[in-house]
Image (cartoon, rainbow, N blue to C red):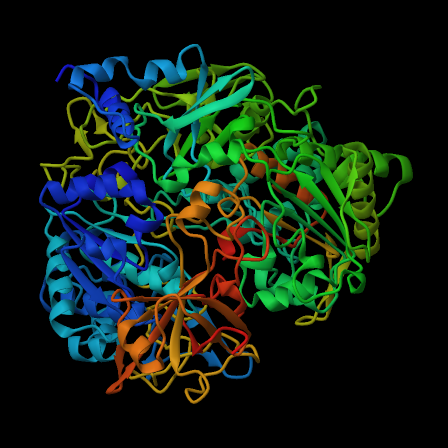
Amino acid sequence: MGISRRQFLQGGALAAAGVALAKPGEANVDAPGLRTKGLKSSTTICPFCAVGCGLIVHTKDGKVANIEGDPKHPINKGSLCSKGSSLFQVAVNDRRLQKVMYRAPGSDKWEEKSWDWTLDRIAQRMKETRDKSFKASELNKKDNKEYVVNRADGMAMFGGAGLDNEECYLWSKFSRSMGVGLLEHQARL
Amino acid sequence: MTNHWNDLKNSDCILAIGCNPAENHPISFKWIEEAIDNGGKLIAVDPRYTRTASKSDIYAQIRPGTDIAFLGGLINYALQNNLTHEEYVREYTNAAFLVTEKYDFQDGMFCSFDDQEKTYDPKAWAYAVDGAGNPKKDMSMKDPNCVYQLLKKHFERYDVDKVCAITGTKKEDYLAVAKAFCGTGRPDKAGTILYAMGITQSTHGTQNVRAVAMLQMLLGNIGIAGGGVNALRGESNVQGSTDYGLLFHILPGYLKSPEFDNTDLKGYLEKWTPKTKDPKSANWWGNTPKYTVSLLKAWYGDNATPENDFCYSLLPKRMGNYSYGKIMEKMGKGELEGLVCMGMNPAMGGPDSGHARTALGKLKWLVTVDLWETETSIFWKRPGVNPKDIQTEVFMLPAASSVEKEGSISNSGRWAQWRYAAVQPVGESRSDLHIIDQFHKRVKALYEKQGGAFPDPITKLSWNYGNGHEPDVHLVAKEINGYFTKDMTIVDKDKTLEFKKGDQVPMFKYLQDDGSTVSGCWIYCGSYTKDGNQMARRDDGDPTGLGLYPKWSWCWPVNRRIIYNRASVNPKGEPFNPKRPLIAWDATEKKWKGDVPDGPWPPMADDKEGKYPFIMVPEGHGRLYGLDLKDGPFPEHYEPVESPAKNMLSKVQNNPVVKLPKNVSSDLGKFPFIGTTYRMTEHWQTGGMTRSLPWLVELVPDMFVEISESMARQKGIKKGDKVRVTTERGSIEGVALVTSRLKPFKVEGKMIEQVGMPWHFGYSGLATGDSGNMLTAAVGCANTNIPEFKAFLCNIEKGGKKA
């Protein structure tokens, strides 16, 4: 037919949008060029299920302009499901959190706070709880002996299936350094 | 997955049980359809007639929670009809191993049960050993105490009629499944089993998985192209988060988190390093000391020395079970002060959400790190509570999305794939990497200034990821891979390799137990080498035609695309299936061709250096008979905790080692219907990532409750009516969806209806609705504690909450 599969797919998208195509050759002048011309592109992997489909993110002036399936990716070859196709709305969405928010005990509203204030206060809370709940040793009821355990049982750390590997690694390293035994995530559910 | 997504195309028969890939892993269907185009068969086994079922050659309906009966029947069918791959079973599994004479099984119970503690003593299930300490074997597999004979005896009770009475499956459908799938026991056929939460979310979930693996071993389907035991994982990096040890019982790379009685490094290594006296067993976990010391070096750097046990004493030691459910129990009792949620939503994701939401209110402080408001971050203003009554201090930190940061994620097929930052994080949001980095740096500064309880694990931690605003993700990835801490000369057979201090370690076989190497997660050693970031590779070449794509991204371990692949060849190294060779031994060149083999040794038949294929267990043979499970060496059918049926196979109703919570009920007068939860393409998990996207909300805007046409008639419910569903835990409202996808089950001569619902909805986001997990019970698998979300009892009434 003289057009690539990718151009064919783009033509299909145009047709679905109600634009009549006189003959297949006209797909060569349709949206792909116009839509992504002059845009920067980089690849990514879908953040939803664990199939690991590839996508291309197009940006203009530091903003996401378009996201579509990566035709070179061996798993999805450009295809995406409805969630993957909606990744654009994760990147560009008014409901995304933009600021650090704080809710004081007993309060009925959020207050905007700075990162610096918040991170300091969280670090203090973590330290207080760690110091207060730290167990240097614990009695084993089966043999009635004390064992060194060096654990802080007053706090739990949850999550990780939505994080990158490098983040998971530091999350594990940080949590264990804090003496946290109560470290769990979505794989247990 | 032992295999990977593209490999599905190589299968002659795909059995999807307890999963619905067309719905929940839609793009995997590209490769399932390619298998079908190539003449393969698709079998769907599910309580509901799903999107996957609609594309299948054979659909078999199964009552929720009866998978062991179903799979046990297939095991029996294969054994009774001589459909097993005999050579594979004899040579590669523990079928020929003899078991101690203490082993016994009577009417639903294995031997050595402690009725008080509700635990077994698995020592009573050990192998019988010879004078040298090796397991005794009978290669004819005729000894009545060999695994093969015990297996046959155990599963002969699972005859087709009995199985169908339990599972509610039509006999003709069951026989069609058995014939099609057990037909892959031939060496030239490949069958794969796909599963997801329908298998794992059960009080006998681990034994469900074992039943899958056992059937695959009997049919010679593990280690081959188009075969395997394939868990379809549901979150983009849940494979990676597990690999990196974000669970109470493990450290990165599946090393065990230390227990209280592993008092020093020597004691830890003695406890967790498996041993074998059989020279033909590779016993890969025998390398545990190298991986442990390399991890300690990654965490404690120059502070970790041989003299101080590489800082082993700085690790916390566990005493007891701290799984998710136990933590929520503690939280509910007010025993926890703080909780940090990194992209996790416990007000929604766990069972008995009503309890979870109350428990959050017992915390002194809560930190949520997410892209959105979640049900967890706004639990204090959820419907029906007064914020004034909740004294929890809440910090809600805005996180960057996946296109706003750089790093890798690992898919279900173990491919670690690199992502790039396309744009800056929106507003003031920041990457999780930055946030974790700040947590550490600020806590450390406080301890350095103020002192406190045992500061050493924090102040001595090695944390060198550059001086930028963000930690340098490449430095983190390089530490994970690992590097040499001094100049090294390593002699590897005929090669002498020279490494300089600081060089990246090329693969995990060069990791050391003396502190001369660092590696944050040994299974990822090889992902970031002197040749650069292997996870970022984009060469889509496919030299074997099997879809291995060896130069696309990087796959653990050592870029091996299909694990246990030494089981795809006979003991001489010749492929069982010459039409689809995955690896083959080249006797002239004395090397393996094809996929990266499971170890470099020559074929098993080689007297001097040959090794058994199942290298991760000390006996080197796949375990048809399990040694270290909490609930028995063989899977045995028990009913879900809430069930409309009596156990038809024994007098033991539920998994005997599972302790039941108070708020479960099998009172069919109150709760006459089977409830089950599920997912859909248009939403994802607790809905945080989808219920705020207008496109997806337009597709599925409301919480719905799916019922059959017969139940709709019986209850006078029409499509679109508001209905209320109630269990012993709670009550929710939804919109009735009446479909022919659901059908009642025949249970003990009576028809029992089922009620299906998604668990994606909650009170936060653009589209809101009641949560399915308000109904589910906090009771889980005997081995993993994964909750039994898939099978419970409920009632349904027309008219919603106001009725």
Q: Quadrant of residue A173?
A: top right
Image check: B707 left or right of B463?
A: left
* Quarter occupied by the N terminus of chain B: top left
Name the residue located 45 percent from the left edge and 49 percent from the top edge. Answer: B684
Q: Quick one: which residue is furthest to the bottom in this view?
A: B669
Image check: A106 left or right of A182?
A: right
A157 and B503: which is toward the camera:
A157
Image check: B208 left or right of B140?
A: right
Report whether residue B146 is seen: no
Q: Quadrant of residue B746?
A: bottom left
Q: Quick one: which residue is furthest to the top in this view?
A: A38
The percent coordinates of residue B603 (x first, y second) are 22, 37
The percent coordinates of residue B279 (x first, y second) are 33, 44
Work out whether B780 lies above or below B540: below
The percent coordinates of residue B796 (x first, y second) are 43, 77
Report whether residue B377 is seen: yes
